Amino acid sequence: MPTLPSPFTLRTDIGKGRLIFAGEGGKIDGQANPDLIVNFGEVVQIKLIDGDGGEHDIVLPDLKIQSGRIQGKGATSIVTFRAEKEGTFTYLCSIPGHKEAGMIGQLIVRNPKAAQDSTEKEAANIIQLPTAIPEPIGKRAPQVVRINLETIEVEGQLAEGTTYQYWTYNGKVPGPFARVRVGDTVEVRLKNNSKSHNVHSVDFHAVTGQGGGAALTQTPPGEEKVFTFKPLNPGLFVYHCATPMVAQHISHGMYGLILVEPEGGLSKVDHEFYVMQGEIYTVEATGYHGNQEFSVEKLLKEEPEYFVFNGRSKALVKQIPLRAKVGETVRKLFVI
């Protein structure tokens, strides 16, 4: 069942010397004569508010929809109807001269299945495979281990019919699994893709010392930074972007794991799985079809719309289920 859209609110205004419908709230906030995008079969509600004191209405001639006329600042009128035709339809103010003065926009009614297929086709698959883990180290002497990370900003598949602007390490969420042993010398090379819009960095919690490399790796788009460290303590540690606002970078997908094996290695198992939980904070509610935008307000309130494992909603249920046979041993390398 498609999700009912939030009601659209349009305020009449004068912008840059012309009359306009100004969007209020959600994805249309602040836009002049915004496109109102809905799925076929959904209920559409448009609230019109008089913001300039003149006489106005809103009409969709092709759909035979018309609001009542309003006049006086703060006056309102609401039209509600079901989108029963696919296509692009004009909305306008029918007061003589107002359409010509700029009060005209579009209602776009799309086929949700076609929109979903298009979204899925165009967006990147950012899921990190739970089996993408380097071989166990076992018994070996300390050595130099190089970890190459590239920060890549990409529109990826968040859910069926839904995308999100991910910030990633090497194009996947979480980033690549790193595996070293106590006493190794770890060389971290961080490159920020030239098409990025943001500075990025990396903070390894396996580093003994403040910042984990964060201060050394603040990297603008198109540049590269390198630092080395020696892991002194065995364990499973997080790494993540540490560029302010740190929580914003993490919630866009910039995190991963590094396993520091003890001297002599770990016990042998039949399967190892790499799983990380993430929280994604979006403007629209869970289930919205289209591109979800990041909501700093929900982040600050700690109210995520999506809990994801390995980057995508329901990934462990549909795309990458964890499989083992009865009697086999499993090591889950898992951080929430």
Image (tube, grey):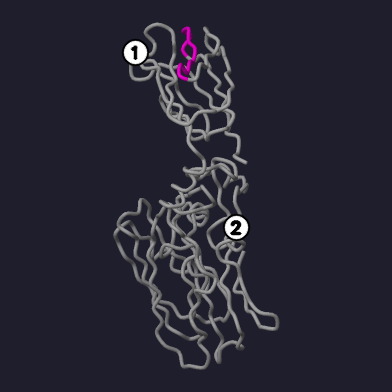
Q: Is residue 56 magenta?
A: yes
Q: Disc 1 designates what residue?
A: 100
Q: Is residue 178 magenta?
A: no
Whether residue 293 is visible here, answered yes or no, is: no
Vertical placement of residue 252 versus 206, above or below: above
Q: Which residue is mark 2?
A: 314
**Nearer to me, 229 or 51:** 51
Q: Residue at x 53, y 24 (%)?
A: 9
Q: Which residue is drawn at the image coordinates 50% and 52% (left, top)?
A: 248
Q: Amino acid at mark 2?
A: Lys
Residue 69, given in percent of the width and then of the height, sits at: 53, 8
Report helix, strand or loop for mark 2: loop
What quarter of the picture does the N terminus occupy?
Answer: top right
Q: Residues within 10 Å of mark 1 (few under 14, many from 20)?
A: few
Q: How many marks?
A: 2
Residue 65's disc number: none
C-alpha gap between disc 1 and disc 2: 49 Å
Q: Where does the image place residue 336, in percent across and percent down from the top left?
A: 62, 64
Q: Position of residue 232 (x, y in %)?
A: 52, 82
Image x and y of residue 41, in percent:
57, 32
Give the magenta range. Answer: 52-62
Q: In which quadrant of the rendered view does residue 269 lie?
A: bottom right
